[in-house]
Amino acid sequence: MPREEVGAPRQDLSAQPSVSAPSARLRGADPFRMPLGPEAAARQQVPLLYGQGGPRVLGLDRCAAFRSRTAVARRRVAVAGLFNTGTNLLFQLLLKNCALDQAPMFQVPWGKHNPLHWRGRHWAPRGRGRHVDVSAILPLVTIKDPLSWMASMCRSPYAAHFGRGAKAAAGEHGSTGLCPSPLPATATKVAWQPKRVYKYSSLPDLWNRWYREYVDASLPAVLVRYEDLLFDPERTVAPLCTCAGGRLRNGTFRTVEDAAKTRAAGHRTITDRSSALSKYGSERERYRRYSRVDLDFVRRAVDPELLRFFAYRVRPGGALNATSR
């Protein structure tokens, strides 16, 4: 689907781009690996359930081209990501630690949660009327393990409405009795705007379609895992600063210990860093809501290349392990 730039007439936003599987861009691709010093190499900061070898970042190979064609005075980095994926955490880490010529933007001009094909066609309240040149914006996009993300959506669904698996009795249709199980029953509607409601066949379908737009796009955009921002923030944020021509600030790297979200409307669940480290470091917690049927469904519904690249391994046996501990 063509990308519409500033000044183009408003077009219909109701049609979603088709998603082919698997991603040709990711097939056989290896994630960015931050060079490790002797001390860093000796320890694994991110839990092993999210893979080995350090942060996994997609899109840094396009940074040089973005810098070469975008004047320093016009370059801006801006945050994007689905609900519940750490967009506020990323923004705070950038503010605290990145020395950039232009301050990072809280969200991309088309709205940080909105689909990418709205780029140049819709203006979020903070960007409306500013005549922002979207070609000068480098989106930094947070992505989160789909199993953890779906559990977060059960707690804080934001603009999404989906079949709640918690209503199903345990064992019925492969359900655990805990939201969002059974996943095949999570047909989803998202009101990206009050009069723009998209339908998805399930929560995994929403996750897959939203991120595949960024993965498949030719424009420069950098995808970064929430888990890396949480467990290994310094090595994760450093290349993001460099991508837009900046650098890490001198001195000690500043983490976000308190909740990254304010208690604004829509931010119903507040988690500080210590609680998040405990929650997202547990394999049992990751799997405990899902049955084998659910996990088989995820493996069918989500692009396997997307899961492989970001080390979001989904093992059907993980459901049995979680309930037996």
Image: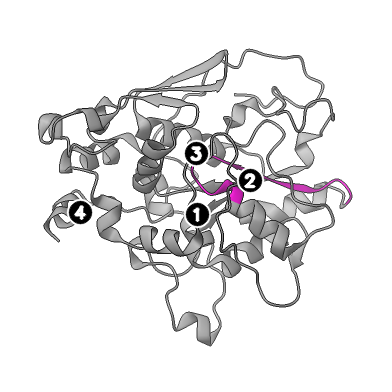
Residue range highlighted in magenta: 73-88
Q: Quadrant of residue 165?
A: top left
Q: Pointers 2 and 4 in contact (CB under 8 A)?
A: no
Q: Pointers 4 and 3 in contact (CB under 8 A)?
A: no
Identify the disc placed on residue 221. Answer: 2
Identify the disc placed on residue 211. Answer: 3
Looking at the rendered image, the disc whose residue lies closer to the viewer, 2 or 4, is 4
The amino acid sitting under disc 2 is Ala
SS for tag 1? strand
Gap in angstroms between the C-alphas marked 4 and 1: 21 Å
Left or right of 87, for residue 278: left
Gap in angstroms between the C-alphas marked 2 and 1: 13 Å
Q: Earlier in the sequence, mark 3 or mark 1?
A: 3
Gap in angstroms between the C-alphas marked 4 and 3: 24 Å
Give the x, y percent position of residue 10.
72, 14
Q: Residue at x 23, y 39 (%)?
A: 178
Looking at the rendered image, the disc whose residue lies closer to the viewer, 2 or 1, is 1
Identify the disc placed on residue 310. Answer: none
The quadrant in which the C terminus is found is: bottom left
| 89 or 318, nearer to the observer | 89
Pointer 1 residue: 225
The amino acid sitting under disc 4 is Gly
Give the x, y percent position of residue 28.
42, 53
| 52 or 128, nearer to the observer | 128
Crowd rating for badge 1 (residues with CA inside 10 Å; few <14, some 14–19, many 20+): many
Pointer 4 residue: 318
Q: Residue at x 31, y 61 (%)?
A: 282
Crowd rating for badge 4 (residues with CA inside 10 Å; few <14, some 14–19, many 20+): some
The quadrant in which the N terminus is found is: top right
